[in-house]
Image: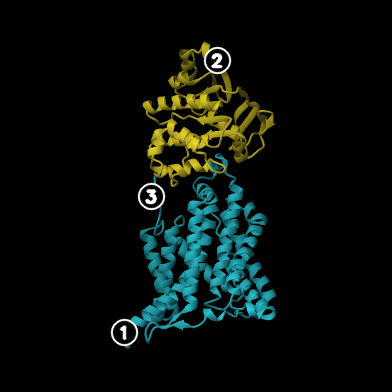
Chain colours: A cyan, B yellow
Amino acid sequence: MLAYSASELWSIFIMQGFAGLSLFSVLLLMALGLAIIFGQMGVVNLAHGEFMALGAYVVYLCSTLVQNHAPALQPYYFLVAIAIAFVAAALLGLLVEWSLIRYLYRRPLDTLLATWGLSLVLQQAFRSTFGAREVTPTLPDWLMGSFKPTESIDIPINGVFVMALTLVLTGAVWLFLYRSRAGLHMRATVQNRAMSGAIGINTGLVDRLAFSLGCGIAGVAGAAFTTIGSTGPDSGSRYIVDTFLVVVFGGTASLLGTIASAFGIAQGQSVCEFFLQGTMGKVAVLLGIVVILMIRPQGLFASKVRS
Amino acid sequence: MLAASQLSVGYGQSQVLHDVSLAVKPEEILVIMGRNGMGKTTLLKSLVGLLPVRSGSIKLGALEIATLPAFERVRLGIGFVPQGRMIFPSLTVEENILTGARGPVATSVWEEIYALFPVLHQMRSRKGGNLSGGQQQQLAIARALVTNPKVMVLDEPTEGIQPSIIKDIAKALKEIRRARKIAIIVSEQVVSFMMELCDRALVIDRGRFIYETNRDQLDADRIRSLLAV
């Protein structure tokens, strides 16, 4: 560690910071979806990672299709693919809620088992369809490469793009939750389900919408993920634990908390990993989280009103 | 307007309401008096659809609604103000009111609400959970009002509220009945509030109505004695 000069250390810090930003983006998108679903209906969706993998596979499919049939569209397909990834994951979410989850409300252990089973089913479905080997979509050229603000700093463009995508989507989710009527119904249902029904809100419909929205966002997380890693059947499950960590650490009912905790965890891991090597970095971050949760069991940000 | 007949409702093994029937006429204010645990809340919750009925029928106009979920009954015209007010604590006052609306709320409705409850206008950007009990009660009434009810159902609106606000609420309810021409069902324990408000009063005891009186024969002492333990 002492072998680095001050300016080298600074460059490493910046670059690891940017690597952390990509991880932050994926974690934040995953956590947003998970927090919406958990906050809305108390369902812990263990299959959430597979919705992310679905989004990644959708991008891969689009990439392959475009390459084989319309190579001229290659520079543009990625943007459309993100939208398709959202729709595909949201539709699958709709189907899952309708066929499985809605029978299991208020039975947390059963939903845990059911969504875990679902995650296994989906993983095997991916394996049967796309093979066990990891796949990588061909990214458009404008996403490749990096710019160098100084000699020793390298900032990858795909990381910046994913970051921007995440910011836009987070903003859109915020607008939806806090400025639209459907978002208002969602927040009301979270706070008092029985009363929401008694004021004329169709809470079953709100649940379905929330579940499908959360899954759709996971699909976009998957699309973002393809720019920083290759997709395998179990890619999603590798992210699910970190995502839960983000949600618990941030406090479930708080958008700001989710953002802050995703940022903290991703940056912590990224920077620690460089200096302490892989696993030790994770251990350090986990220890930090355990200590903070002992002091603040309700998470970083919990809303303060009397009820 | 709203008519329930032969309602039986209970929790698990215990039956709370025994073949209860009641009907409220258009533009009538019906007050249901009873001590704690006699079945007032159970009755009102089953009217609104928060509790399933074991047997019996509930009709809104000509429509049978006993099997409909709560949100559909509300949309058909039953506005509900629950016991304990059940304001959404981390929504603002304005947002709390909006939860009851389908589609945009007309300016005239906002004006109506803020004329009835000026304090809500001052508090409109505050979180519902930070309001006092009386303010929350007014908010709960406003929230029910934007569902555009034909019948408004209120469960113990005076519970835990200071006397001056109780008078305001009685006045507001009469004003709502006059302006909106709707029927109102209120459950209560406070006799003075009932005297102020009711066109007709019922007394419920152990899940059955034991006394009924119209406003012109209203006898406060008789009702007090029925409520005494």
Specify the amino acid type for callout 2.
Thr
Q: Which residue is mark 3?
A: A304
Query: Residue A230 sits in which quadrant?
Result: bottom right
Instruction: Name which residue lies at 67% across and 29% down.
Output: B56
Quarter of the image where the N terminus of chain A is located: bottom left
The picture places residue A201, in percent across and down from the top left corner, at: 57, 44
Determine the CA span between mark 3 and mark 1.
Answer: 44 Å
The picture places residue B49, in percent across and down from the top left corner, at: 60, 36
- Visible in this render: residue B159? yes
Q: Is residue A252 left or right of residue A212?
A: left
Q: Residues within 10 Å of mark 1 (few under 14, many from 20)?
A: few
Instruction: Name which residue lies at 41% across and 59% down.
Output: A299
Judged from the image, the secondary structure of the residue bearing numbered disc 1 is: helix
Specify the amino acid type for callout 3.
Lys
Instruction: Name which residue lies at 51% across and 30% down.
Output: B154
Q: Which residue is mark 2?
A: B213
The picture places residue A247, in percent across and down from the top left corner, at: 47, 61
B72 relative to B161, above or below: below
Specify the amino acid type for callout 1.
Ser
Judged from the image, the secondary structure of the residue bearing numbered disc 2 is: strand
The picture places residue B16, in percent across and down from the top left corner, at: 58, 30
Q: Which residue is mark 1?
A: A7
- Visible in this render: residue B35? no
Front-most of residues A197 and A175: A175
Determine the CA span between mark 1 and mark 2.
Answer: 90 Å
Determine the CA span between mark 2 and mark 3.
Answer: 47 Å
Are discs 3 and 1 both within one chain?
Answer: yes
- Chain letter of mark 2 equals B
